[in-house]
């Protein structure tokens, strides 16, 4: 009896222990599941790519480049319908339209159902939907988004460029996305008072039924592709619309320090059109600082551009790194010895010449040397365009010091390989306060 009692007690203890263990395991699994759900919600919230500051109309800027260009491609499909003409080539006619009747059918299939009813549009429409009768480019400016129960609504602010005469028309479109059906609809915004934040858009829960034309495809944009898009946009717009670049895309502090005014920027572009047209991004660095994203791009001429991005296609640009030196550079400079400072300053001056920034390259010349040798900046520019007409990298030779003056011999090598020969230059430099310096030079033939 004594033994049976002990066995029974042991069994009870084991049973209680097993029950306790099972209960603990169940609690752990539930907690992990809850954490996973919470994490999924956080990830989904992060992945939609929004800056969480709603405007007056409840829309927010789009940071997700994949969705940005998915929306732009949907809009592009609608514009292709508007521009259809009989005999259009296959590359332009992506919807495979074969007649004006099909064009009308496609346009109505892509237009928002409520918009069609409100404006009494049918297949006999004439002036209600103006067609595009010229060769055009679609140039995105910005997109904003609002999430609703069944529909995601976007407002796209774009330029429609007439390629024939380089005229821009700024337009706004409402694009609604039905993620469940993978469909979209378009609503043109006919009149806008103010800007994109002043556009009022009614909420809707109406699903967008699929038809022959309104299916969208998710666009996947790599960082490399986005960098190329940004650089191509900046280059193209600088050549054709320098006023827009100066007023809307150059960093405010930078453009005043570098160019002073829009006219100087325009003159700079006109003098350097051929080189600007050739510029292509070849390298990039990415810096996400929690506020925005900085892309540091280099082109084939070793020019450096800094794109400060707040959201997709919403950025400000600095066209060099010397006009407004980074804090990191200033710290490095201050810690450097005199020889290193001379080399850093020579690098800066050669970068100015490579950038065709002859105004700033002229301004750092020793005043006496500048006046005796060139008299005015135009003469300096003419001289440099003749003797240093390509783009160069620096090789440092002998350095001597005489009093507070440094004499640095350098050799310039043509990175474009236009000329196999090198240019020998003697740079005479005085170091001033902070990061300032003055130089004179001689080009040795």
Image: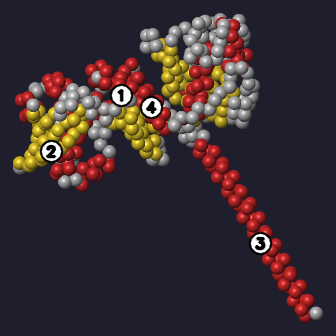
State the residue position of label 3. 21
Residue 181 picture quarter = top right
Question: Count of labels shown?
Answer: 4
Q: Secondary structure at mark 1?
A: loop
Q: Residues within 10 Å of mark 3 (few under 14, many from 20)?
A: few
Query: x, y percentage for residue 83?
Result: 58, 12
Residue that extends furthest to the right in the rendered view of this protein: 1
Q: Describe residue 398's horizontal placement relative to residue 10 as left or right.
A: left
Q: Nearer the viewer, mark 4 or mark 2?
A: 2
* Residue at the image point whose x is 82% and y is 77% from the top: 16
In the picture, the quarter occupied by the N terminus is bottom right
Residue 26 picture quarter = bottom right
State the residue position of label 4. 228
State the residue position of label 2. 397
Mark 4 vs mark 1: which is more N-terminal?
A: 4
Q: Nearer the viewer, mark 3 or mark 2?
A: 2
């Amino acid at each position: 009896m004594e033994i049976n009692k002990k066995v029974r007690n042991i069994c009870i203890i084991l049973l209680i222990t097993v029950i306790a263990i099972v209960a603990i395991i169940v609690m752990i699994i539930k907690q992990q599941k809850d954490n996973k759900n919470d994490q999924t919600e956080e990830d989904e919230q992060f992945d939609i790519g929004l800056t969480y500051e709603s405007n007056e109309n409840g829309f927010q800027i789009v940071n997700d480049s994949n969705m940005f260009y998915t929306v732009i491609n949907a809009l592009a499909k609608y514009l292709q319908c508007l521009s259809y003409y009989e005999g259009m080539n296959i590359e332009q006619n992506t919807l495979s339209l074969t007649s004006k009747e099909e064009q009308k059918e496609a346009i109505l299939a892509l237009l928002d159902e409520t918009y069609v009813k409100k404006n009494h549009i049918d297949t006999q429409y004439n002036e209600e939907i103006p067609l595009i009768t010229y060769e055009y480019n679609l140039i995105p400016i910005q997109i904003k988004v609002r999430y609703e129960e069944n529909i995601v609504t976007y407002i796209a602010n774009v330029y429609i460029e007439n390629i024939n005469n380089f005229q821009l028309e700024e337009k706004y479109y409402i694009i609604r996305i039905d993620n469940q059906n993978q469909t979209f609809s378009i609503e043109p915004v006919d009149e806008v008072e103010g800007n994109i934040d002043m556009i009022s858009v009614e909420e809707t829960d109406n699903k967008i039924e699929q038809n022959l034309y309104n299916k969208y495809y998710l666009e996947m944009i790599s960082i490399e592709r986005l960098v190329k898009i940004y650089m191509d946009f900046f280059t193209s717009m600088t050549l054709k619309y320098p006023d827009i670049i100066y007023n809307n895309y150059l960093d405010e502090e930078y453009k005043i320090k570098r160019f002073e005014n829009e006219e100087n920027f325009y003159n700079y572009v006109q003098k350097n059109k051929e080189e600007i047209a050739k510029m292509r991004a070849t390298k990039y660095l990415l810096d996400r600082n929690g506020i925005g994203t900085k892309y540091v791009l280099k082109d084939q001429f070793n020019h450096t551009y800094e794109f400060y991005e707040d959201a997709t296609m919403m950025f400000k640009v600095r066209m060099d790194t010397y006009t407004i030196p980074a804090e990191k550079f200033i710290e490095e400079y201050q810690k450097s010895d005199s020889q290193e400072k001379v080399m850093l300053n020579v690098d800066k001056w050669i970068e100015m010449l490579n950038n065709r920034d002859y105004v700033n390259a002229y301004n750092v010349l020793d005043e006496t040397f500048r006046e005796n040798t060139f008299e005015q900046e135009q003469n300096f520019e003419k001289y440099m365009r003749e003797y240093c007409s390509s783009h160069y990298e620096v090789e440092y030779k002998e350095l001597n010091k005489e009093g507070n003056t440094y004499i640095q011999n350098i050799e310039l090598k043509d990175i474009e390989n236009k000329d196999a020969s090198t240019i020998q230059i003697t740079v005479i430099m005085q170091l001033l306060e902070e990061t300032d310096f003055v130089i004179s030079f001689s080009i040795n033939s």
